[in-house]
Image: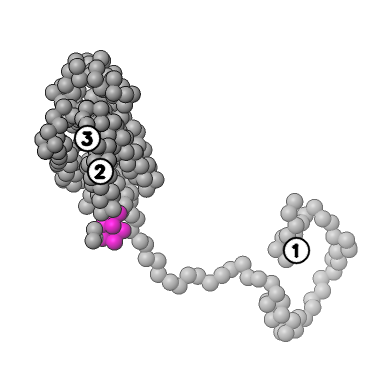
């Protein structure tokens, strides 16, 4: 049993060592002794709080909305439908990172850019990336009212779609400029395959971000997107080197300008905007 000072607690299990005097004795306590006793014995009753409590409004970080889960469920349904309706094409697209031979077999049988698989997965990729970007803006800025609404999501969807189209037109322009039309299908196939893998991985990351809106999942998502850019760079160089006689050095410079520079610019601008309020 814990031992407390006798002045605060009387232990009933310890008997007094001296007999109790039953004779009532009225002792007079001097005033000086009374003051000294009051200074030694603490008071259990404290003075009341005289200040004013000003409650602060609670900042909520609840970013999950009903349509968010519906969108993720739609993306999962899209993956299942493509796997069930086009099983061979689905497997061939996923096997593209395995080597040039898989790309050659795929291009001999069908063109990914003219298939339902490509259109559906590209649409799903745009919707998912826009959702991830929106929730990242909410967490980094802590401004739920401004960024967590349908209008902002529509703007991000349009921006992501514009980014995808810009990359596509840049590939077409460069292949037209260097007269390497045979490599366009290879490069688009590589980009399409890597985008599908990115879609698979980013779905659970976005789901975790919805239920636990912290910066850790944003960094994980950005790391995945950066890794996807590196894989597109590597596989794009390999496929282009096989199809053309262009120097590997020039191919490397081209893909660096197409992959790494735009992504690094976007990430840097985003960090500056949410850190300093301006991208400059």
Q: Is residue 49 visible?
A: yes
Q: Residue at x 24, y 37 (%)?
A: 247
- Determine whether the residue tagged by mark 3 lies in a helix, strand or loop: loop
The span shown in magenta is 271-277
Q: Earlier in the sequence, mark 2 or mark 1?
A: 1
Q: Earlier in the sequence, mark 3 or mark 2?
A: 3
Q: Which residue is mark 3?
A: 246
* Closer to the eye: label 3 or 1: 3
Above or below, comparing residue 180 to residue 59 in the picture: above
| Mark 2 touches mark 1? (CB < 8 Å) | no
Give the CA separation, mark 3 to mark 2. Answer: 12 Å
Q: Which residue is mark 2?
A: 253
* Closer to the eye: label 2 or 1: 2
Where residue 102 appears, as percent x and y from the top left, is 28, 20
How crowded pointer 3 is (Cα within 10 Å; few <14, some 14-19, many 20+) is rated as few
Q: Which residue is mark 1?
A: 6
Q: Earlier in the sequence, mark 3 or mark 1?
A: 1
* Closest to the observer, 146 or 33: 146
Give the CA separation, mark 3 to mark 1. Answer: 93 Å
Most extreme residue toward the right is: 18
Where residue 85 appears, as percent x and y from the top left, is 22, 15
Where residue 162 appears, as percent x and y from the top left, is 14, 41
Q: Is residue 255 visible?
A: no
| Mark 3 touches mark 1? (CB < 8 Å) | no
Above or below, comparing residue 110 to residue 184 in the picture: above
Q: Is residue 273 magenta?
A: yes
| Mark 3 touches mark 2? (CB < 8 Å) | no
* Closest to the observer, 262 or 62: 262
- Determine whether the residue tagged by mark 1 lies in a helix, strand or loop: loop
């Amino acid at each position: 049993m814990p031992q407390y000072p006798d002045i605060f607690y009387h232990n009933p299990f310890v008997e007094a060592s001296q007999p109790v005097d039953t004779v009532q004795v009225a002792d007079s306590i001097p005033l000086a002794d009374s003051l000294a006793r009051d200074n030694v014995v603490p008071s259990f009753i404290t003075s009341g709080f005289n200040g004013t409590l000003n409650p602060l409004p609670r900042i909520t970080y609840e970013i999950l909305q009903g349509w968010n889960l519906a969108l993720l469920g739609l993306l999962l349904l899209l993956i299942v439908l493509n796997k069930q309706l086009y099983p061979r094409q689905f497997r061939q697209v996923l096997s593209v990172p395995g080597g040039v031979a898989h790309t050659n077999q795929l291009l001999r049988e069908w063109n990914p850019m003219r298939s339902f698989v490509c259109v559906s997965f590209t649409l799903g990729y745009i919707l998912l990336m826009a959702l991830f970007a929106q929730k990242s803006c909410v967490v980094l800025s802590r401004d739920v009212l401004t960024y967590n609404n349908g209008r902002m999501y529509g703007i991000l969807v349009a921006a992501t779609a514009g980014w995808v189209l810009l990359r596509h037109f840049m590939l077409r322009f460069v292949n037209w400029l260097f007269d390497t039309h045979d490599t366009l299908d290879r490069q688009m196939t590589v980009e399409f395959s890597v985008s599908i893998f990115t879609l698979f991985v980013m779905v659970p990351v976005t789901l975790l971000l919805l239920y636990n809106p912290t910066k850790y999942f944003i960094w994980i998502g950005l790391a995945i997107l950066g890794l996807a850019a590196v894989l597109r760079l590597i596989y794009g160089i390999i496929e282009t080197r096989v199809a053309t006689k262009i120097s590997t050095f020039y191919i490397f410079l081209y893909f660096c300008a197409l992959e790494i520079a735009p992504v690094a610019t976007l990430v840097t601008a985003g960090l500056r905007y949410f850190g300093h309020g301006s991208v400059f």
